[in-house]
Image: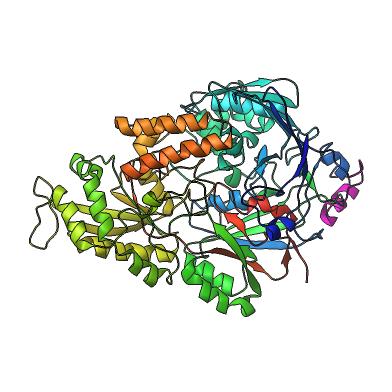
Amino acid sequence: MVNRSQGADGQLSRRKFLKATAGVGFVVSTYASGRKVVAQTPSPVASGNFSEAPGLAEQVGAGTLPPVAERLPRNPMIVTPSEKVGTYGGTWRTALVGGGDTAWLNRTIGYDGLLRWDFAWQETLPNVAESYEVSADAKSHTFKLREGLKWSDGEPYTTEDIAFYVNDIYRNTELNTSLGDNPFTVEVKDELTFSVIHENPAGLFLSSLCQDGGREWVRYPAHYLKQFHKTYNTTNLDQLVKDAGKADWVELFRTMGSGIPGTPYDAVWQNPELPRLHAWKLVQPYGDTDRVTVERNPYYFKVDPDGQQLPYIDNVTFDVLQDNQVLLLKATNGEIDFHMRHINSDANKSVLAEGQEKGQYHFLNTIRSSMNVVSLAFNLTHKNAAYREVFQNKDFRIGASHAINRQEILDTVYVSQGEPWQLAPRRETPFFNETLAKQYTEYDTAKANEHLDKVLPDKDGSGMRLLKDGSKLTIAIEVATGLDPATIDATNLIVGHLQAVGIDAQIKTEDRSLLYTRKESNDHDAVIWGGDGGYNDAIPDPRWYMPFSLESNFAIPWAIWYGKNSNALSEPQEPPAEIQAQMKIYDELKATPDAEGQVALMAQLLEAAVEQFYALGIGLPGPGYGIAKNTMHNLPPDGMPDAYVYMTPGPSNPQTYFYEG
């Protein structure tokens, strides 16, 4: 039996980083059968020896709120802050950009799943669940919830909520038309214990619970949502549907408890009535005004080593802005307390450095998981057969790649940070594949024309390449307006490079939510995005290495076919045999519970990606960073990974941030 603390080991560990990030103690046991058990060590805080924020204490005194010991679970999660035990008070000011920026909400104030990542991004640790057990074949995962855990309205969170999610949402064919590629059932053992049984080995299930998708297990309070579900409300559901102006019970349920397909709507951030387990509860929802506001959850299940109930900060406000430049101005004016999204580009660092004294903030250094500043994905499953034939021709993609002057883009837009790089894992990872990273990155218009002439030899009078029917190939390259402005600048340079070799490319900017709708509907020619999956997120999110998800912009219908996602806006398309062979490698990886086996299979998958060359990258990004107010403490130490799969900064425990000085 081994005692292990959060952040205590792993290949990502850095001595300074880990020294500053002590965490919760856990016991890990592995039995001869191969069964693994991970559990939180018993709480060292004496029962009842807890304290709370002054505002909550006033409510207790007034008799409107139970005492803190009654609001906490029997074994609350104890979080050791990165610097020191904090004090209560203050409002954390940050921001969102555009109408679909729920990612920053999920990462900052929404990171509380059954499990969580350790600081080093190596281990999956208990969180809402007090312990978990994995069978030797990785088909069965058993969890024990914290006794006395409560939703933000004071109602118990138990296996009833788990069963409601699995049986009445996940397995309800009206709410969810796809069970995914490895369906599961739930076996409830008692009020606190349940097992998730997959049809096939689920080697990546634990890590999935630490990611954004893990929110599904902790976001459906049965006591609240049953009133909107036809299985349970047999009295006035039709009237509720009518009063809400919805088409049917499914639309009502999604509005009140989940999300609306094809839109960025998420009830967690748009329905203040929905109970939650987060450190803060929603007051002003996303979409109503130009600000999202949350306040302390009096039933939050975590405490510090002194028994103070978390969070320390009273409120968090998210100004909803329309572009990154406004956010940059607010940051330099000192109106942002902590942020590491949208404005943390290479080009902006000098501007932010100049504003440090005025804005009273400092930099936080991160390790970017992104492996590319810009990805360019031509739609290999285009609805137009002529375009589809061109884009699927590898010579076209090779020619387009050689046409791009990557060093010019890096020098001009990214202040000479990084190096020419395709969509491939970073050197720091065990997944690094030099061929995948460097193939076709040489800027050579002669090579570009050589390959393009094999596909589109004919041109019009202006030198633009023609399709077989004599019409001009015009490609709309779609870019979300909420991205880093440098992305727009880079895209403009890419457009010029492509036009120089006869590809009539045109930039098309649009709101992020519209772009997502268009690409999921398979209505796009090409899309510009970032380079996710360059670090430890390569295995759980191989979006650029195979048609994996709705983020695989080069072939979303193939990804829909692979993931059996019939909830998507476009129909699935069966991919060619060689791509299905690559998908089988990933299926084998997902069924492999040990890390070494997963790494070996990932290497095979990347070799296949070398041959397929699905999409184009531009350059490896430079070092990452964020900004934080000088008076804000317990922030992420230098060296924190920055990735959506890691849910940065969630694993740094935002509930322990506080103000002093």
Say which of 216 and 543 sits in front.
Answer: 543
Q: Which residue is at a point 50% across and 41% down the rendered structure image?
A: 539
> Residue 90: x percent and y percent?
74, 63
> Residue 460: x percent and y percent?
9, 58
Q: Quadrant of residue 438?
A: bottom left
Principal secondary structure, stretch drawn in magenta = loop
Say which of 263 and 570 sits in front.
Answer: 570
Q: Is residue 621 left or right of residue 472?
A: right
Say which of 38 and 193 sits in front.
Answer: 38
Asked if residue 285 shows in the view, the reply is no
Q: Which stretch appears magenta?
A: 45-65
- Is residue 189 shown in magenta? no
Q: Which residue is at a point 59% across and 38% down the rendered structure image?
A: 207
Q: Is residue 102 left or right of residue 564?
A: right
Split into 4 quadrants, where in the image is the N terminus? top right
> Residue 316: x percent and y percent?
67, 57
Q: Quadrant of residue 143?
A: top right
Q: Is residue 446 left or right of residue 90?
A: left
Q: How many marks?
A: 0
Q: Is residue 151 left or right of residue 543?
A: right
Q: Which residue is at a point 43% across and 41% down the rendered structure image?
A: 262
- Compared to 651, does 562 lie above or below? above
- Compared to 493, does 459 lie above or below? above
Asked if residue 489 shows in the view, the reply is yes
- Compared to 448, does 568 lie above or below? above
What kind of colouring is applied to the model shown? rainbow
Split into 4 quadrants, where in the image is the C terminus? bottom right
Q: Quadrant of residue 234?
A: top right
Say which of 382 and 406 sits in front.
Answer: 406
> Residue 269: x percent and y percent?
59, 47
